[in-house]
Image (cartoon, rainbow, N blue to C red):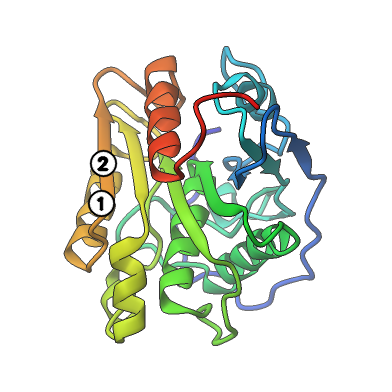
Amino acid sequence: MSFTGPSFGPGVRTVRRALEFGRTYVVRPKGRHQATIVWLHGLGDNGSSFLSSFGSWSQLLETLPLPNIKWICPTAPTQPITIFGGFPSTAWFDVGGISEDAPDDIEGLDAAAAHVANLLSTEPADIKLGVGGFSMGAATSLYSATCYTHGKYENGNPYPAKLSAVVGLSGWLPCSKTLKNKIEQDEAARRAACLPILLCHGKVDDVVPYKFSEKSSQALSSNGFQDAAFKSYNGLGHYTIPEEMEEVCAWLTSKLGLDSRSS
């Protein structure tokens, strides 16, 4: 995946066709089910694919030493992407450019966040819920975090899921400039302060620049997200490595209070 194509126009498209989400892949827990995490792929991928030496995301997640987690790996809808000159691709939302000034596709972000919440809606009441992802999937995960803290989507509809952990790899925070307005209320501030978030990013990422993720982390911290951690990796590009996934496993085990045993 690479972000190439014409420069961004006057704004994201205002007419959206009906979105049809693709196939969802599920990795069942090998031990006692304690948590469910929706894991979101990057632009141009799907719930079962990931272009790396690991193979697919679902294959990688199945090998992690996290036997108490159920992973749900949905596939984004295929839709025209502005940065690709309108050429269709699997994407959680439209992308006009990777820059601080590029407009956010609020409608697409809301639809993606609602899809995530819907996937979590049937989980048992005693199961901790989370969302994570890579690149555009990470951006959707972080947007979901802001919807949870705000208690509603940008369109005003209530956000139903209770998130206990959010992970973003090689991504960025959409709508960071309006984040302050979303957590001014006491309840939103409380949720922000208590929500664990982990951001990881490679310092030589040539797709989503490292500085965007770094600024996203700073935006979260400065707006009351007191449990937001940021990990950087020298020599890491736009992919994942075992060291990063080990960090994710240790962090999830700690933040979700997972058993170390498999049964």
Give the label on residue 217, or none: 1
At x 43%, y 53%, the residue is 97
At x 28%, y 17%, the residue is 235
The outermost residue toward the top is 53
Residue 145 image position (x, y, % from top left): 44, 62
Amino acid type assigned to the residue bearing label 2 in the image: Phe
Q: Seen in the image, is 114 located left or right of residue 142?
A: right
Q: Is residue 150 above or below residue 20?
A: below
Element assignment for label 1: helix
Q: Seen in the image, is 187 located left or right of residue 131?
A: left
Residue 169 image position (x, y, % from top left): 42, 38
Q: Nearer the viewer, residue 239 or 230?
A: 230
What is the CA distance from the residue labelled 2 to the residue labelled 1? 6 Å
Callout 2 touching callout 1 (CB < 8 Å): yes
State the residue position of label 2: 230
Q: Nearer the viewer, residue 259 or 138?
A: 259
